[in-house]
């Protein structure tokens, strides 16, 4: 069986970007807490909701993509994930 190296590289990049973004929120949370005057409860709720939604969304999208493959979704997903974290830096504090 011959491996499709391009698809494997895109899958690996997407997985790496997702893991980096998941790890960035706890690191950025202390900054957001100070900058936005958040309580520990609010900070914990933000982290909890991010982990819960990730735990629900990842298996859901995995199931959907296994049932109905969408070729453009594979390279598009890492691109969206790459834009997510830097967009937090440019968003005004009034949005939170």
Image (spheres, rainbow, N blue to C red):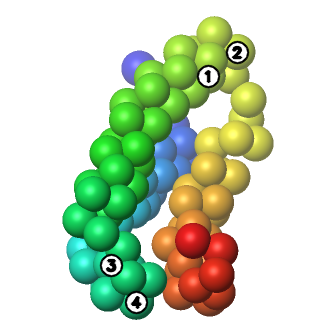
The residue pinned by badge 1 equals 65
Please give the name of the residue rendered at 27% of the width and 57% of the height, measured from the top-left corner: 41
Alpha carbon separation for disc pair 2 and 3: 41 Å
Q: Nearer the viewer, residue 81 or 72?
A: 81
Mark linked to residue 11 = none
Instruction: Characterize the local packing of mark 3: few (<14), some (14-19) or many (20 or more) Cα atoms within 10 angstroms.
Output: some
Q: Is residue 43 above or below residue 57?
A: below
Coordinates of residue 28 in the picture (x, y in percent): 32, 77
Alpha carbon separation for disc pair 4 and 3: 6 Å
Q: How many marks?
A: 4
The residue pinned by badge 3 equals 33
Mark linked to residue 35 = 4
Please give the name of the residue rendered at 51% of the width and 31% of the height, measured from the top-left corner: 57
Q: Secondary structure at mark 1?
A: helix
Q: Earlier in the sequence, mark 1 or mark 4?
A: 4
Mark linked to residue 68 = 2
Q: Are marks 4 and 3 in contact (CB under 8 Å)?
A: yes
Q: Earlier in the sequence, mark 3 or mark 1?
A: 3
Please give the name of the residue rendered at 61% of the width and 22% of the height, measured from the top-left corner: 65
Residue 8 visible in image: no
| Quarter of the view holding residue 83 | bottom right
Coordinates of residue 39 in the picture (x, y in percent): 30, 69
96 with respect to 54 (left or right): right
Q: Earlier in the sequence, mark 2 or mark 3?
A: 3
Q: Secondary structure at mark 3?
A: helix
| Quarter of the view holding residue 68 | top right
Q: Looking at the image, is mark 3 or mark 1 nearer the viewer?
A: 3
Please give the name of the residue rendered at 37% of the width and 35% of the height, measured from the top-left corner: 52
Q: Looking at the image, is mark 4 or mark 2 nearer the viewer?
A: 4
Q: Secondary structure at mark 2?
A: loop
Q: Earlier in the sequence, mark 4 or mark 2?
A: 4
């Amino acid at each position: 069986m011959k491996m499709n190296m391009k698809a494997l590289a895109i899958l690996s990049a997407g997985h790496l970007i997702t893991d980096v973004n998941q790890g960035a929120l706890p690191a950025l949370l202390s900054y957001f807490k100070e900058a936005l005057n958040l309580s520990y409860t609010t900070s914990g709720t933000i982290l909890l909701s991010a982990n819960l939604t990730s735990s629900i969304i990842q298996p859901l999208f995995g199931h959907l993509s296994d049932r109905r493959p969408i070729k453009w979704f594979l390279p598009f997903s890492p691109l969206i994930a790459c834009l997510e974290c830097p967009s937090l830096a440019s968003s005004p504090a009034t949005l939170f």
